[in-house]
Image (tube, rainbow, N blue to C red):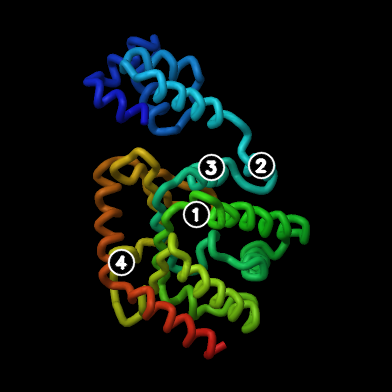
């Protein structure tokens, strides 16, 4: 919102930086949600951008709330910092596009599926640690049932539903969960079948997010076991937007995807 207000008012990053007596990179980080923002900074920018009183009050409230501790900070010993940042952004998203190649997305995982994944990835993980991972997933999923859930667009490689995780019973429950989720009015789930052949998302899983008051996605998130990167360059975002368009074209329809999920359940 601050970036849009700056642009609408005709001011540059250099103007805002001079007004705040800080570097342009610092202002850029504020606009990209890479750093905490102070209420007094918002107030000063509101004056520069000639923001009306009602909108300024709203911005000040957002700034105050954004610095409150999120629920995910309780898991600082379990979840790495780079993923805590992602969870915070996920909680604020308006639209979320997620392609997964190997496993069910975290927002759709059942508790027993989570346990099986954790045991496979980290055989040395204690029961208490596994329980905390399950609780984290539940906390993230709770927003899906809230008053203002994000629009979720899932694209799953067929391998996700064919690879048995946790045994037949666990996998059947997980597949039923996917079918139930796909019927939600704010969730679209589509399977990318093996028969499609090569496709532009073969480089790996990703999440693209768009936020309220934004007219385009803000970044693409790509992670691995040791960290994550946020691709924010407009060229990178445009590239992934094209990938999503291709996935939309190549994937089965939501109804046909549910049909494939039902077939996979019968095969367990």
Q: Earlier in the sequence, mark 1 or mark 3?
A: 3
Q: Earlier in the sequence, mark 2 or mark 3?
A: 2
Front: mark 1 or 3: 3
User: Looking at this view, is 215 or 158 the one in front?
Assistant: 215
Q: Are marks 2 and 3 in contact (CB under 8 Å)?
A: no
Question: Looking at the image, which residue is at 56% across and 57% down?
Answer: 145
Q: CA distance from mark 2 to mark 1?
A: 18 Å
Q: Is residue 57 visible?
A: yes
* Mark 1 Cα shell of 10 Å, populated few (<14), some (14-19), many (≥20): few
Q: Earlier in the sequence, mark 4 or mark 1?
A: 1
Q: CA distance from mark 1 to mark 3?
A: 18 Å
Does 136 sit left or right of 154 as displayed?
right
Residue 177 pos. (x, y %): 56, 72
Q: Earlier in the sequence, mark 2 or mark 1?
A: 2
- Rendered image: mark on residue 247: 4
Query: In the figure, residue 2 lies in which quadrant?
Result: top left
Q: Secondary structure at mark 2?
A: loop
- Rendered image: mark on residue 88: 3
* Mark 3 Cα shell of 10 Å, populated few (<14), some (14-19), many (≥20): some
The residue labelled by disc 1 is 224
The residue labelled by disc 2 is 76
Question: Looking at the image, which residue is at 50% across and 68% down?
Answer: 181
Q: Is residue 127 above or below residue 10?
A: below
* Mark 2 Cα shell of 10 Å, populated few (<14), some (14-19), many (≥20): few
Q: Secondary structure at mark 1?
A: loop
Residue 94 pos. (x, y %): 41, 48
Q: Are marks 4 and 3 in contact (CB under 8 Å)?
A: no
């Amino acid at each position: 919102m601050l970036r849009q207000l700056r642009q609408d008012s005709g001011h540059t990053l250099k103007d805002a930086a001079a007004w705040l007596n800080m570097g342009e990179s610092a202002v850029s980080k504020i606009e990209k949600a890479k750093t905490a923002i102070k209420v007094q900074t918002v107030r000063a920018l509101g004056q520069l951008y000639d923001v009306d009183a009602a909108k300024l009050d709203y911005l000040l409230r957002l700034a105050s709330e954004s610095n409150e501790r999120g629920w995910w900070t309780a898991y600082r010993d379990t979840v790495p910092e780079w993923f805590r940042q992602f969870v915070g952004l996920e909680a604020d998203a308006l639209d979320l596009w997620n392609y997964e190649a190997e496993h069910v997305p975290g927002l759709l995982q059942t508790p027993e599926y989570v346990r099986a994944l954790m045991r496979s990835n980290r055989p040395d993980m204690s029961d208490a640690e596994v329980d905390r991972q399950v609780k984290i997933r539940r906390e993230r999923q709770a927003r899906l049932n809230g008053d203002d859930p994000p629009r979720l667009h899932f694209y799953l490689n067929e391998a996700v539903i064919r690879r048995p995780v946790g045994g037949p019973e666990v996998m059947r429950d997980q597949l039923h969960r996917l079918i139930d989720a796909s019927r939600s009015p704010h969730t679209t789930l589509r399977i990318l079948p093996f028969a499609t052949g090569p496709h532009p998302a073969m480089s790996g899983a990703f999440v693209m997010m768009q936020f309220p008051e934004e007219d385009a996605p803000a970044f693409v998130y790509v992670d691995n076991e040791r960290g994550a990167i946020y691709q924010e360059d407009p060229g990178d975002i445009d590239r992934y937007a094209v990938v999503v368009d291709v996935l939309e074209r190549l994937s089965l329809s939501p109804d046909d995807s549910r049909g494939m999920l039902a077939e996979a359940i019968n095969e367990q």
